Amino acid sequence: MWESLSMSEHDPGEQRRRQQQTEFAESVTGTIEATPNRRAEYVELDTMGSPRSSDGSANKRRLSVEQTLDDAATAVEDTASNQHVKIEYDAGGFSLKKLLRFVGPGILVSQALLDPGNIESDISQADTSGYKLLWLLLLAHILCIFVQSLAARLGVVTGRHLAQHIRQQYPRPLATVFWLLTELAIIGADIQEVIGTATALHILTGIPIWAGVVITAVDSFLFLYIQRLGVRVTELVFGLMVTTLAVCFWVEMVLIKPDAREVIKGMVIPRIPQGSAVQAVGIVGCVLMPHNLFLHSALVGSRKLDRREETREGAIREAMRYFRIETAVSLVYAYLINMAVVVVFCKAFELMRAEGIAYVASLAEGANVLSHVLGNGSKYVYAVGLLAIGQSTTMTGTLSGQYVTEGFWNMPVKPWQRVLITRSISL
């Protein structure tokens, strides 16, 4: 065995593989420092680059698992103290108080399911198929809970987010393709957010759409200041914006008095009306958004777990359990909001058709439809909700782009730089 090993040392291919393995190990761990007061657990890489335990050898590279996983900055680059929430591990059962410390990443992720593009999809769904695709909307959210939980698990277990893993494990050309597709998805979502916010400002103040677009481009930089106040403040502000949207549409749903029986039938009976196939595909596409996977796997890094040797496994399992719960609750919350939008406009369009009044099913004309059915004040309620979610999704889109760029290219990107680039392209 030793003879074959010594022969492999002179093989150029073997030397190249070892060099790549060395670069991979150094990129994962950075500088490994051991101190007398901190014990690091090591695993070693075999000749194929897979981690395994061993007694030690000059032909193997060591990785400090604690250095990789104990630092939440591997998933979130900003290592300021207010950008992390320290979680102490205890072996007890479920705790509501501890669950609240994990609440946040799921709320930020849920905003992508509620952006102005999704609101317009809900309006279109209400026009083309009524209540009949509510079951598909529910199924899409259930699938989203599953895939987002996997994204959160990736970040918790490895301490690194999806973009970083793709950069390390895929060939550069393929990783570049992934990066380009993800950037296009983020820019496409950002266009909808700009238009939605500008539309809301037009309804509230009467300013032209182009002026609303300019204001939206400028005020995005003001929202970056919120991040400097800490991760918990950021999560709280964005949570309040989602709740603003929820209250606006739930109030209008109560006022418009939909047919509860039709709503329940739409949620439990699978059916796709004729001519609604494209709309059905659009519903799934608006919920299962690829850049959300990158965002979620990075946001969980804001929780700094107790990864000491004696508590590491328990802390990781506990975090995964609480993140699953938080993700499920956040996305069910998002479904209830999307459902309210569909239900409100289903009833509104029914009343418009019954009166023989022509209407346009779009984001911009939604205010006029509600104004005719519920009164002039309803369009302002609609606009407030649209403005809140348009502004908040702008910031989560910025975070997604920041993590994607940093992860794929291993280069720091400041939030204001990311906003400037993405928003310029969107405009």
Image (tube, rainbow, N blue to C red):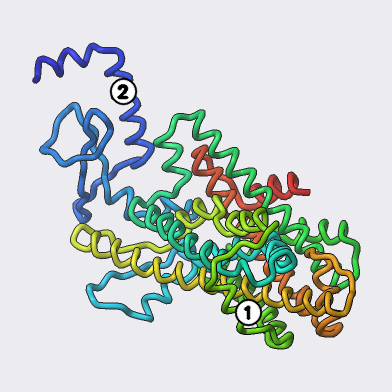
* Residue 227 point in image, percent of width and height: 58, 63
* Residue 349 point in image, percent of width and height: 78, 74
Query: Is 234 left, or right, of 367 in this rendering?
Result: left
Q: Identify the residue shown where x is 80% and y is 65%.
A: 361
Q: Is residue 182 above or below residue 324?
A: above
- What's the residue type where badge 2 is placed? Arg
Mark closer to the chain start, 1 or 2: 2
Q: Nearer the viewer, residue 221 or 335?
A: 335
Q: Dot 2: within a 10 Å radius of its alpha carbon, few (fewer than 14), some, or many (20 or more) residues? A: some
Please give the residue where the numbered disc 1 appears in the rendered image: 262
Say whether residue 79 is visible.
no
Q: Nearer the viewer, residue 65 or 183?
A: 183
Q: Number of marks in the image?
A: 2
Mark in front: 1 vs 2: 1
Q: Quadrant of the N terminus?
A: top left
- What's the residue type where badge 1 is placed? Glu
Q: Identify the residue shown where x is 60% and y is 61%.
A: 112
Asked if the residue under mark 2 is in contact with the one under mark 1, i.e. CB atoms within 8 Å, the reply is: no
Q: Which mark is residue 17?
A: 2
